[in-house]
Every structure is written in C-alpha cells, then in structure tokens.
Image (cartoon, helix red, strand yellow):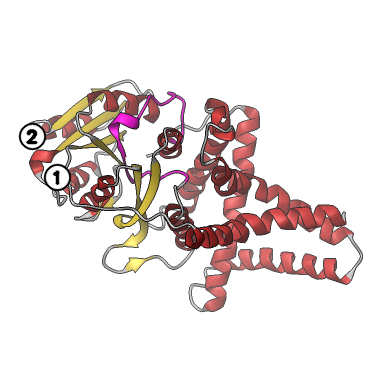
Amino acid sequence: MKAMFWISAGVVFYTYFGYVAWLWVWSRLSPKPVQRGTNEPLVSMVMVVRNEEGTLPGKLRNLAELDYPAQRMEFVIVSDGSSDRTGEILLEAAKDGRFHILVSPEPKGKACRLNEALAMVKGEIAVFVDARQEIEHDALRRLVENFADSTVGCVSGELMLGDATSGEAEKGMGIYWRVEKKIRELESASGSVVGATGALYAARRSLLGPIPPEAILDDVLLPLKVARQGARVVFDGRARAWDDPDLGAKKEFRRKVRTLTGNYQLLQIAPWVLSGANPLRFRFVSHKLLRLAVPFALATLLVASAAVPAPLYRAACALQLAFYALGLFALSNQRHGPLARLANAALTLIVLNTAAVVAFANFVSGRKEVWLR
C-alpha cells in the first residue's frame, strides 16, 4: 500500500506541478522565440456550424470587421445539417463574394465538414474559428504575424473566459483556463504546444492533411500533424477570442467529457502519437494523457492513505477528505472571500476528474461523443 500511495502521489504531483516546473526550466535553458513580422498572406477563415441562427449574424459581422485587408480574406463556412435558419443566413452572406458557403441538409459531423471546407480553401493560411466566441479586432493580424517565421506551421490564439469589458472570470473554469494557458505559454516558449485553442487557431494550408471523419479533437490532431512534419506549433496570447465563462454546469461538463474522450480516441485513430513519429510525444503524454490517469491515481491515493496505520498517511487521508469537502462547500453558492475562491478551485478539479472517469467509460464502452455547438 505504501508503494501504491507514493506512485499515485507522484503521478498527481507531476501532472499538476512537475510538468509545469520542467517546462519553466526548459524554456529558460533552451528558449525558442518566434521571429514575428508584418506580412499579409491570403487568409481563409474556416467555420463549421450547426443550428447557429442566434449567434451567426453577430459572428459574421465580427469576422468581416477584423483588422485585416478585405481583399486578402475569404470565408469558407459549412452548415452541417442545420434545421433552423442557419442555411438562409449563410446564403444571404454569400452575396458578398468573399463568402464561400456549403449548406448540407444531412449532418455528418464536424471533422467531415472540415475536410469539405479545406477542399474549398484558397488561402495560404487557414484560420479555424467557432460560431459562439467573439474575436478581438486585431487577433487575426496577431496570428498571421507568427507565420513570418518559416519554422512556424500552426499558431493557437487565446480563449478568454469572461467579458472583454470587465475582464476574465475569477472562479471555476476561469482558474482552470489560466493554468492551462500558462502551460501553453511555456510549451510555446520552449518549442511547441500540444494542441490549439479550437475557437481560434491558424495553420499553413500546405501542412494540413485530411482529418479522420470520426475525429473529435481537430484542434489537437491537426497541430500534431503539423509538428510531425517538422514545423512548430506556437501559442500567441495577443490573439484573443472571448467566451461566456458560465454556459451552465451540464453543458460545461459534457464539453469536458467530449474533450477527454477525444484524447482517448486519438490513441485509436492516430496511434503514431505515441511513437517516435510524434516529436511532441513526451509533451503529449505529460499534458494530455496523464490527466486521464489522475482520477484513478487520486482514488488509489485515498484508499492507500486510509489503509496504512501511520501518522503521515492518516494526515494525508485527512487532507484529501478536507479537499473534497471543500469542493462540496462550493455548491453552497458562497461567492465571496478567499475560502469561496479556494472551494471553487477544488470543485473545478473534482468536476474535471469526474469528467475523465466518464470519458474512460465512453472509451471502454465504445460510446461516441458527437461535436457540440
């Protein structure tokens, strides 16, 4: 039991602290800055939508008003089996010759539609966006500046949870995202990021191959394919998109389950990610896969600490129980004070690890997770 305790503690510690510390040291021992420059290649904005009549008009305005020469932009948008007015809105937008629209009555899934969209792309740079988030005015120009560096093949923007006026959220997933963004910053500063922000990322069209139609995480698979070809995947926190930090607990939980299920799926549809063909294999395991193991390590840690009759292990057990109790305290809707902030962080960690268990069940049972709006 003692060995199980220390092995489990090591997995948890490395996943949440050790990997970040390693990145911090490595980014200083071997920094890899991006040589940005001002260039204006033809850019293709790519978006797949389904039943987005409520958000689509505002999103189309947001895209058309980005700070980039109008003659150097095109918009490739595919409607995947929408049953509302999404198709009508897109066909109206197509009166502007820069908009290339494909409206299909049959839903086939996001990955399949991305392949169709990429076949229509004419730009040197493909920029992937989602329908809901608002992109900052200068974000596209910031992304493109990174491609002046010939070693860069893919650039991830930054997803901000909150409001552009009042700033980022302080609780729940906002804390998680700030930690996640710090990891991406350090990965980028020392080489390449594992994956990108699905709401806003760009890649050289020449490096983008077809996506397996069943793929869930295009924003992880495509960047890994870019890295496999020897190009860097970098993160630029200046290119920002804003999203609602609280979409509802049920929807947020489903979104996280889908993402974690997608990490399991990558091992099936792209087994090369665990081979020497993936130059980011160590980072992929440390950043993505070990998070799938953490809930099982936490359960083992609790059982082992309760089973060993020694003061150190009993204290560890008590601390774990206190942590979980703190997460339950967050459900009392106490919104202010340091204890409330700590409780929200504890609840976020509990929810994320619960989602990882559900993702594992999906993987074992073969249950498929479709892409969410």
- Evaluate whether residue 85 shows in this view: no
Where, by quadrant of the figure, is residue 238 drawn? bottom left
| CA distance for labels 2 and 1 | 10 Å
Magenta extent:
194-217
Q: Nearer the viewer, residue 139 or 324?
A: 139
Q: Residue at x 53, y 26 (%)?
A: 269
Label count reads 2
Name the residue nearer the viewer: 230 or 45.
230
* SS for dot 1: helix
Mark 1: amino acid: Ala
**Residues at badges 2 and 1 in contact (C-beta under 8 Å)?**
yes
Q: Which mark is residue 306?
A: none
Query: Is residue 102 rendered to the left or right of residue 367?
Result: left
Label 2, residues with CA under 10 Å away: few <14, some 14-19, many ≥20: few
The residue under label 2 is 96
Our reading of the magenta stretch's main secondary structure is loop
